[in-house]
Image (tube, coloured by chain):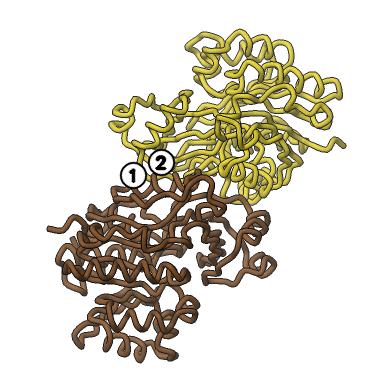
Chain colours: A yellow, B brown
Amino acid sequence: MKQFQVVGIGNAMVDVISHATEAALADMGVQKGIMQLIDMPRAVDLYGRIGPAEEVSGGSAANTIAGIAQLGGRTAYVGKVKDDQLGAIFAHDLQAQGAVYQTALAPKTTEQETGRCIILVTPDGERSMNTYLGVTEFLSPSDIDEAQMAQAEWIYLEGYRFDGPESHEAFARAIAACKAAGGRVSLTLSDPFCVERHRDAFRRMIRDDVDLLFANRAELMSMYQTDDLGTAMRAASAEVSIVAATESEKGAHVLWDGQHRPVPAIPTKIVDATGAGDLFAGAFLWGLAEGRDLETCGRMGCIAASEIISHIGARPEADLRALFQRHGVL
Amino acid sequence: MKQFQVVGIGNAMVDVISHATEAALADMGVQKGIMQLIDMPRAVDLYGRIGPAEEVSGGSAANTIAGIAQLGGRTAYVGKVKDDQLGAIFAHDLQAQGAVYQTALAPKTTEQETGRCIILVTPDGERSMNTYLGVTEFLSPSDIDEAQMAQAEWIYLEGYRFDGPESHEAFARAIAACKAAGGRVSLTLSDPFCVERHRDAFRRMIRDDVDLLFANRAELMSMYQTDDLGTAMRAASAEVSIVAATESEKGAHVLWDGQHRPVPAIPTKIVDATGAGDLFAGAFLWGLAEGRDLETCGRMGCIAASEIISHIGARPEADLRALFQRHGVL
């Protein structure tokens, strides 16, 4: 048995969550519903203009790994923080959840700080993300422990990290070490605009290395440059063994071996959509690592996503195993 | 018209909120339901043992001032943070709420960090607080701007700050400047064990300077060394013009001029009791500054407290004015 069921690699961030009206978003020049990269001066300016906030550990892949850890999975996370207060908060929250987190800290003298994502939640529960990457931008091949990757049944790569040139090499190193030891590779496309920025690199990795692709509707359509989800799903399915596509309140689709199984969403009042896709992936991967069939993995993903959107913050508050039992999938 | 309706002085803290069972509390040596002062090594040890947490600005008097600001009151806060990430979070959240916050920052080179309070919430919603004071312990007379105190209709003093010797002098300076300009003084007793530690100093201040005393049942009985709330309330009422005593799910009592008016609590499911007393005081003071009668001030206090206990965190999430309108007090 390998030490880890899933090792995630991504942007290590602390979320700064505040509420804002649509008018306030427009006023602050924030585009609704997507992730925008911002620099430190913009981060300072924007922070000065938002309302009171709360801070919770975030980061897309880190949320996924936190979900797997809460489910009792054997899991680890790789992502860079600084030796500062936000970095300590990030590391604590993953470790306290039961995940292994041991990435080297950027020293106190580093100019950049630990990354943060200013998330503005509108009354409809939609989140608009403004990401100051900080030190997590500098995740490089030397941060990848090949022995750890060899001990992973699955690695889980966060598409957002394609925004860093050295991280492409870091991903390549992780993939090589994982595959050489018989492990498999999963990838999330993260964001439609991230796909725009890196379509060719994503496409190469999908064709050459990816065994399981996570994407939402907008990301998948951007990837395959079509405005029809069915077309995009079929194109993806022709390139990857397993495709798990999420479609917000319509649920999800799992495609493999010519099969296409739609999975219904769990009806839930949306308080904050942040982390829905991350926890879908976490629950799906955990189910897979536990030997469940792909349709059940999809159902677990939808149940976990419904928990996350019912409260502020992107890490689970309720006991996911208990939820799975209540829904008859565990 | 004075610039400020209320200026609060207290311990500037960021709350680190996590969930724990009663068994876990015992295991970690945390006493349930009270505030314990801890040093940095204990804070580090305890933080390493608690589960994932979220960070929100706290501090008893700061919560009160945030509530007044949210209600639209003219308010300011004095409390010491360091020039670090948690200090920036604390300052941001008060300013973003509309309060004036301008206390001099302890420089980056200061050994102590910004104070934090590790709050463990048990399944019954009760909070057990573990406070590392950090730089807020060093609030001193030089941090008090006499001109600001002279511009306050009310100052609001946090009993917890009696734990710092220099803060007694800081309070004395604030009281003198406020009273000389015709302002009035309110005090919260904060915690029964804090009362034990400083009974004589509290007593002197109550007799000599305090116009309005906030206390919960346990604090008031500790103050007057009796196990009967009625006796304690009568004793307090003989020494202070206005007494506002809270009694958890039983509501509150307002006493003045020989009058005693009980005020019912608003029945609410308790998620996290942190900040209930702070927001009671905030709403009460705001009502008073707006010229409302004392019984209405008490009702506003109970309504605001019911909002705070219905969610995690000690700052209001719902619109308090809208709540007051719904309950017919505005």
Residue A18 is labelled as: 2
What's the chain of the residue with tag 1?
B
- The location of residue B100, given as percent across then percent down, is 29, 50
What amino acid is at disc 2?
Answer: Ser
> Label 2's element?
strand
Sort mark 2 into few (<14), some (14-19) or many (20+) by Cα contacts within 10 Å.
some
The quadrant of the image that shows the N terminus of chain A is top right
- The location of residue A223, given as percent across then percent down, is 56, 13
What amino acid is at disc 1?
Answer: Ala
Q: Which residue is mark 1?
A: B96
Up/down of B157 relative to B57, above or below: below
Q: Is residue A301 visible?
A: no
Q: Residue at x 47, y 75 (%)?
A: B194
- The location of residue B228, given as percent across then percent down, is 41, 90
What's the chain of the residue with tag 2?
A
Q: Is residue A278 visible?
A: yes
**Contact between labelled residues 1 and 2, with CB atoms less than 8 Å apart:** yes
Q: Residue furthest front?
A: B142
- The location of residue A80, given as percent across then percent down, is 64, 32
Cα–Cα span, label 2 and label 1: 11 Å
The quadrant of the image that shows the C terminus of chain A is top right
Asked which quadrant contains residue A52, the reply is top left
Residue B72 is labelled as: none
Up/down of B318 relative to B190, above or below: above
- Residue B127 vs residue A156: left or right? left
| Image label count | 2
- Residue A317 vs residue B138: left or right? right
